[in-house]
Each structure stands twice: as C-alpha cells, then as structure tokens.
Image (cartoon, grey):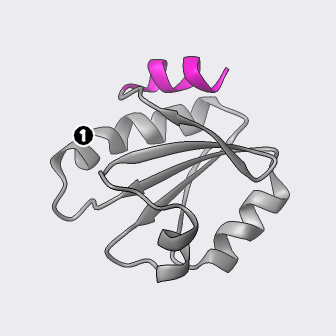
C-alpha cells in the first residue's frame, strides 16, 4: 500500500476495509497524545513496507460511528483487521514490531 490513509467517517473506513483483506487501524489523538505522536513515524514506515492497508483515525475529529464500532479506552489503539473483523490489538510501537505482529 505504501501510505497511511486518514479517514473521518465509517463509510470511508468501510470502503478501505472492503478493498483490503488486512487493515491496520490506528485510533489516535495526534494533536495532544505524545505516544500517538511518537508512534506516527513508525506507523508510516511500517505502511511503506507492508501489503496491508494502514489507516489512521483522529478520534477528536472522527464521526461517532467509528468510535461506536471500534471503541477504545486509550490512545493510541492499533487494531489488526482481517476480512473486516478485528483480530488483534497490536502492541508494537516501532515499525519492526508492527510488521512482525502483522505477519
């Protein structure tokens, strides 16, 4: 894929999920969350090296429907979606660790 796509609506997210078997979804608050800011360059680098689709959702700017579908209690929360279903919460905070977890 090569890039991180930013989405705001559930419809945009569903479009990406429907087009890709594997999606890595980052629910973040980049304007104020320091761990989110630290993860961002690693997330981008992993996207450049992976066949999976990488998607970022700014929880401060996203439609409530996304947050209802993928609830999170902490940011960043990185979910691995396979064929549209969340299969894991990724713990890696470097590009190497993320790629290893994606498999």
| Image point (62%, 76%), residue name | 10
Q: Nearer the viewer, residue 98 or 77?
A: 77
How would you rate the neighbour count of disc 1 (Cα within 10 Å): few for under 14, some for 14-19, many for 20 or more?
some
Above or below, 11 relative to 47: below
The residue nearer to you, when weighing 87 against 52, is: 87
Q: Mainly helix, strand or loop, the magenta region?
A: helix
Q: Residue at x 27, y 59 (%)?
A: 30
Q: Is residue 29 left or right of residue 65?
A: left
Q: Percent x, y for residue 25? A: 55, 51
Report which quarter residue 69 is drawn in: bottom right
The question of residue 100 being in magenta is answered with: yes
Is residue 86 toward the left or the right of residue 61 in the image?
right
- Report the side of 42 relative to 88 (left or right): left
**Residue 99's spot in the image, x, y percent?**
56, 23
- The residue lying toward the viewer, choosing from 45 and 68, is 68
The answer to whether residue 60 is left or right of residue 82 is left
**Residue displayed at 40% across by 57% down:** 72
| Location of residue 91 with respect to 22 vertically, above or below | above
In the rendered image, the quadrant that contains the N terminus is top right
Name the residue rendered at 22%, 43% in the picture. Answer: 35
Where residue 44 appears, as percent x and y from the top left, is 46, 42
Residue 48 in the magenta stretch? The answer is no
Tell me where the magenta segment starts and ends, as one range. Answer: 94-103
Does residue 1 appear in the picture of this structure? no
Which residue has dot 1 on it?
A: 38
Q: Position of residue 7 (x, y in %)?
A: 54, 70
If the image is split into quadrants, where does the C terminus sit? top right
């Amino acid at each position: 894929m090569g890039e991180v796509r930013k989405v705001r609506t559930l419809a945009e997210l569903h479009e990406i999920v429907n087009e890709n078997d594997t999606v890595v979804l980052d629910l973040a608050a980049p304007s104020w969350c320091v761990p989110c800011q630290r993860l961002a360059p690693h997330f981008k680098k992993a996207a450049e090296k992976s066949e999976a689709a990488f998607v970022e959702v700014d929880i401060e700017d996203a439609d409530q429907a996304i947050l209802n579908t993928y609830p999170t209690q902490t940011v960043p929360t990185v979910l691995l979606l396979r064929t549209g279903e969340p299969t894991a919460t990724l713990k890696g905070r470097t590009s190497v660790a993320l790629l290893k977890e994606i498999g």
